[in-house]
Image (cartoon, coloured by chain):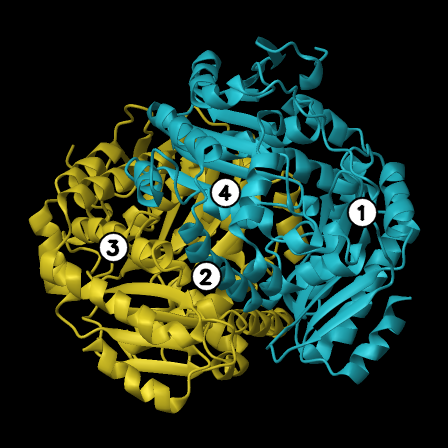
Chain colours: A yellow, B cyan
Amino acid sequence: MAQVPAARQRPGTTRTLLKGVDGAGTVRRTVLPGGLRVVTETLPTVRSATFGIWVGVGSRDETPVLNGATHYLEHLLFKGTARRGALEISAALDAVGGEMNAFTAKENTCYYARVLDTDLPLAIDVVCDMLTGSLIRPEDVEAERGVILEEMAMAEDDPGDVVHDLFARTIFGSGPLGRPILGTQETVTALTRDQIAGFYHRRYRPENLVVAAAGNLDHRAVVKLVEQAFAPVLAKSTGHPAEVRQGVKAVRTAGQVAVLNRPTEQAHLVLGTPGVPRHDERRWAMGVLNAALGGGMSSRLFQEVREKRGLAYSVYSYSSSYADTGLFGIYAGCQPKRVEEVLKICREELARVVEEGITEEELHRAIGQLSGSTVLGMEDTGSLMNRIGKAEISYGHHLSVDEMLEKMAAVTLDDVHAVARDVLGAHRPSLALIGPITDRRAAKLADLLV
Amino acid sequence: MAQVPAARQRPGTTRTLLKGVDGAGTVRRTVLPGGLRVVTETLPTVRSATFGIWVGVGSRDETPVLNGATHYLEHLLFKGTARRGALEISAALDAVGGEMNAFTAKENTCYYARVLDTDLPLAIDVVCDMLTGSLIRPEDVEAERGVILEEMAMAEDDPGDVVHDLFARTIFGSGPLGRPILGTQETVTALTRDQIAGFYHRRYRPENLVVAAAGNLDHRAVVKLVEQAFAPVLAKSTGHPAEVRQGVKAVRTAGQVAVLNRPTEQAHLVLGTPGVPRHDERRWAMGVLNAALGGGMSSRLFQEVREKRGLAYSVYSYSSSYADTGLFGIYAGCQPKRVEEVLKICREELARVVEEGITEEELHRAIGQLSGSTVLGMEDTGSLMNRIGKAEISYGHHLSVDEMLEKMAAVTLDDVHAVARDVLGAHRPSLALIGPITDRRAAKLADLLV
């Protein structure tokens, strides 16, 4: 079934994008006049539904001065509208046992609520009210500044968290993708109510939003409730759905070493390189490579670092994609005196896949692993909402589970070797490290990366 | 439907404990000759299944010298049997995208795997093999010692984690429930292969195990596979299912203050008292009280500490139950200079529920919250497996979702006030605190608890 991108779908119309078969749901999209996209996946066998609103704005859209504004705004949307104060917002969902939350990423922000299907109208009402009617009152901005500074302090107390921010900075430098999502103490302390409210009014426009819902629901009923809730906003909008983000060739660096000397029990390290961008078809091969190298307990890194040598409790690799670039990293937490040893093993395993790729047995296992977890992820309405929301805002195109399984199954040994060589092998790896490491010792680590 | 406890169910027979209605599954129990209990919940609308084995042994069953042995053993069961090495165990589940893991608690240990329904026989084979045929080879004991020391170091680096262990110690002292599940550096370093293997052979007997499975499955097929896998063990066993744990009136203390002076960004505190034991019918009222006081975003603590004053990012209360006692705690992470202020608010809110109970509006909201999340929890086979496994090993009795909802709905304002007064009000609260707090300042904190 050929899918029309939202930008070319006539406002006021509905399209069926995927037909539900084999336990998968039917995916439909309505584009409302004003440019608001509403996608749903109906799954009549469950009793719950998850409703979310995705905003196509993240920390990479901030200027250095506004760093942290997207996340700050996310907090403020929970503080109240003309219809509800902060207590009423949370009480409404608490009273029905719903889970409501939000997250800010580098390219998107998402607000969502998971509820019993019978409570879906309530969830739609509350989340849409938050998105369209936030007051952003000066006193709330001040109270929430304290909360965010506490959130940053809590993250600072977790070196396994800090090291990932540090790693993004080694790869993307001081550019937008290298900056922390939460911002810095300086920017969060300095941000004003007007700056944040300006950000809200400029960015949270209907054409920049995707409404996504999954579970036991009726598409038309959801559309109707969303249309009512957005009526005042849509009346003023003449927009068309935004094109999916293309990015602007993010700055990337290689062979950087960043070490934070801290009195922690463990040393926390991330070793890696730039990765594949989101629209790159090699992402399927990269998924397989990542699974084989560090994606599970049978992966090379887990076996070499943990099972055989007992050097770490937590060791894994991961692959992230953005519009124009990506990130590939290997994380390990180990005794500070073992850093060089662990780093050497990780470096060797990275070199080995660049050189030789993976084995046939690993290929089959990795494909099985990705396929199985894709199908297992279909049972949770939260995961489904995430999948269709992300697909709509990032690709403007939806793949069925069967199509995803086909893409995975089609990955060959050569594909995996090619992506290892051309992506992981294209750059000298960078290193981020936090632990009780002296400057003298840190200075020598770069030699281990060659 | 009157349920017979497993200990009085004739070996070799099967009972239907709960009939599936309204989307809930049918719960059945078979007691195998040799004393092994197998409980399942069938839910034909899903495509997955979770298989678990619960062992009625946890860290409270250890002597001080053996502290950490239960958790150490849990790690070792992943290292290999006569049929599979560590790589084969993890590769088997990875290859089908399954999630396999285990956890050790104070009274139980659980091993489980979540897979597609078609892979259930594989999951049963692997998990049963691990439980019945672990080799516990000396070289694996040594390699895994390093991994566990790393796990402890990682936990040490997370003050929000350490403070909970410290709090258990303030309430339960140096008794079994006050000791850390992971053990200490000293005990883990000293534990020998023979001590751990002895623990395994003494404790992992069929009568001490509960097999629990939930999802799209056939009870008889599961029983048959389990019976085959356990055949050599069951042939040697003449046991009857163990009685549920009754406990021995754990030591409890009150009004203790434990402060760890550490250079963290945030101060992490837990304030609380002994709670209700597992078999105490007041647990339903305690659940409601906990929800209203610190269970969600609309709770008193969240509103007072975070929403109104912006003093913390994370603040909540929790209630844990053991066979003979319980724990009630309030956690908050805040700026070190705000400790006294946050502590004062938490202390006041605790005193206020002891004095006055909660309001009618809070009662209804809390009951709604608990009911909604109970029903939402029915969709995930992992949660269902947990529920029936825990119910069987801890109560020997299963409540249907409707019965649980009735118990919650029946809680009155008086019940809540009574449990607040009689449980939270019975002891002067204790405090555990980690942060950059001088001895002099710590010495004055006790005055704030009166």
Mark 1 in CB contact with mark 3 (< 8 angstroms): no
Q: How many marks?
A: 4
Amino acid type at circle 1 is Gly
Q: Report, in whole angstroms, how far the alpha carbon at label 3 lies from the one at label 4.
A: 23 Å
Chain to which mark 3 belongs: A
Residue B85 shown left or right of residue A278 in the figure = right
Q: Is residue B25 above or below residue A438?
A: above
Q: Is residue A438 left or right of residue B21?
A: left
Residue shown at 61%/35% (left/top)?
A: B202
Q: Which class describes the residues within 10 Å of circle 3: few (<14), some (14-19), or many (20+)?
A: many
Closer to the camera in the image, B65 or B161: B65
| Residue A146 coordinates in the image, percent (x, y) | 62, 74
Mark toward the viewer: 4 or 1: 4
Q: Residues within 10 Å of mark 1 (few under 14, many from 20)?
A: many
Residue annotated with mark 1? B275
For residue B102, the mark is 4
